[in-house]
Amino acid sequence: MPDEGPISLRHRLAGLTRSVRPPTGDGVPWQPDLPAGRMLALPGRGSVFVRDNLHDGSLRGHPVLLLHGWTLSLDTTFYGLMPSLARRYPFAGFDQRGHGRTLLDARRFTIPELAADALAVLDELGIEKAIVCGFSLGGPVGLHLAVARPDRVAGLVLSAAALSYTQTRRDRLFWRAIAVSGRLPGFGAGTSAAARYFGANRRVPEFEARWPWLRRELARAPLSQHLATGRAVAGYDLRGRLAPLRAIPATVVVTEGDAVCPPRLQLQLAGQLGAHSIPVPFDHDFPVARPAAFGEAMLRAVDDMQA
């Protein structure tokens, strides 16, 4: 894919102030070929949007549970992985609360509650034990699921994730800003923040072709929902708590060019988990901007878990 070099975090954040026009016209010129989706009711928890191929009895191996990143969704995180994964293994993925098509209330919640949502999805789909595949936000959610119910986790595949996002001064200042922003009257009504951030990639021609679909998907959730998730992310810390999980096979796909989640924090996670690591030379926008490379790296890690 043509590239003009890495895009700095400063340039991406500056994109939050620029206009991002929604796609024009009724049609979407490009969209990925994904398994069918539906709403799934979780008793006492509301309904979530899921995609799966569990009806395909010809597939073997542990089912794979996909957990997406913050401000993204199942589709925008895993559109480069789902087609190839669906041909090889049974899988299920869903939009976590406040993301994509799962628009629950924006009350305060925690990462363990998001992990409880994931466990409820496994229960409703009849999945006894899964390989949990989490990117960014999906990493902490998958780890909390494994801490609470290690008997339901056959393996962990994590990428661009850390044990805590308050280990650097920059991150602590960022989460403080998120907390203040959430209190501003009327703030969070818009839906374009994620598109403005990831839209910095539009200088790459192949990304530009996918942009109408991505812009539409990234704008599904209001900013207030993302802020609620941000407060949950700021409040979790799993440092020193993963020793019981070292019996679970794990692989960490380390994004070595990551400006959001520093590689040293990803390696810290791998070390405390006793996980194998796979380095890739990409930034935190890896699944959005490099879907083919993302799908290849994550599928390689899932293959290792299945073996």
Image (spheres, rainbow, N blue to C red):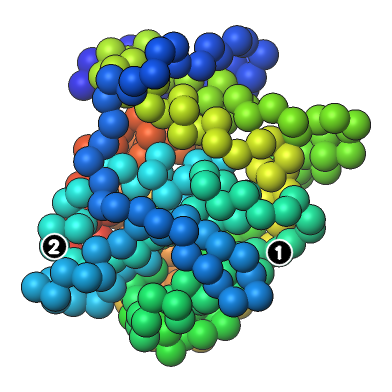
Q: Position of residue 202 (x, y in %)?
A: 40, 15
Q: Nearer the viewer, residue 198 or 27?
A: 27
User: Amino acid under label 1?
Assistant: Thr
Q: Which residue is painted at 56% across and 21% down in the image?
A: 196
Residue at far left of view:
58
Q: Which residue is painted at 38% across and 34% down in the image?
A: 288
Q: Position of residue 283 (x, y in %)?
A: 42, 34
Q: Quadrant of the N terminus?
A: top left
User: Amino acid under label 2?
Assistant: Arg
Whole-Å distance between the Cαs marked 1 and 2?
33 Å
Using the rendered image of the protein, determine whether residue 297 is visible from the camera's viewpoint.
Answer: no
Q: Which residue is painted at 35% across and 76% down in the image?
A: 130
Residue 40 numbered tag: none
Q: Nearer the viewer, residue 99 or 294?
A: 99
Left or right of 249? Residue 305 is: left
Which residue in the protein does label 2 denote? 88
Q: Which residue is painted at 46% across and 25% down in the image?
A: 215
Left or right of 50? Residue 63 is: left
Q: Earlier in the sequence, mark 1 or mark 2?
A: 2
Left or right of 169? Residue 214 is: left
Which residue in the protein does label 1 denote? 110
Residue density around tag 1, few if under 14, some if 14–19, many if 20 or more, within 10 Å: some
Tag 1 and tag 2, C-beta contact below 8 Å: no
Q: Position of residue 5 (x, y in %)?
A: 35, 17
